[in-house]
Image (cartoon, rainbow, N blue to C red):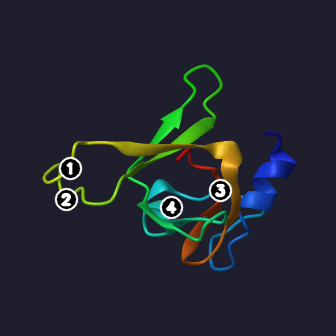
Amino acid sequence: MGVSGWREIFPKRQGIGCQDGEGMRLCELENKEVINACDCKKLGYIVDLVIDECSGCIEAMVIPKAGKLCGFFCDGSEYIIPFKCIRKIGEDIILVEIHEER
């Protein structure tokens, strides 16, 4: 994804100390709920990112499946959502488009 693609997904932030084209920090992404636009299902919150070691680009975001509480009460399964599936990052949510297999 080129620089122009990043600017479409990551909106410019307003405020003191923000420069044009400044990115978003992981701690800001962790506070946004991820929602699938295909079925309006709430997937959860980002706990990790998959980063390409060579390019340094984000490849995917990791979201634990429902029921995971500090590793308890769940089989440890998680959503691995490719970064290209992100459609919009808003104030409170990250809108993704994934088609789950049934």
The residue at which mark 1 appears reads as: 74
Drawn side of residue 19 relative to residue 79, left or right: right
Does label 1 or label 3 sit earlier along the sequence? Answer: 3
| Residue lying at the far right of the rendered structure | 4
The residue at which mark 2 appears reads as: 69
Give the spatial CA distance, label 2 vs label 4: 19 Å
Numbered label attached to residue 29: 4
Name the residue: 49% across, 69% down. 32
Q: Measured from the top left, where is residue 89 in percent x and y?
A: 65, 66
Does label 2 or label 4 sit earlier along the sequence? Answer: 4
The residue at which mark 3 appears reads as: 23
The correct choice, above or below, for 54 with respect to 49 in the image is above
Name the residue: 65% across, 56% down. 23
- Identity, as a three-letter code, of the amino acid under mark 3: Gly
Q: Residues within 10 Å of mark 3 (few under 14, many from 20)?
A: some
Q: Residues within 10 Å of mark 2 (few under 14, many from 20)?
A: few
- Identity, as a three-letter code, of the amino acid under mark 4: Leu
| Residue lying at the far left of the rendered structure | 72
Q: Residues within 10 Å of mark 4 (few under 14, many from 20)?
A: many
Does label 2 or label 1 sit earlier along the sequence? Answer: 2
Closer to the camera, 98 or 87? 98
Q: Are marks 4 and 3 in contact (CB under 8 Å)?
A: no
The correct choice, above or below, for 26 with respect to 55 in the image is below
Q: Measured from the top left, where is residue 15 in percent x and y?
A: 65, 80
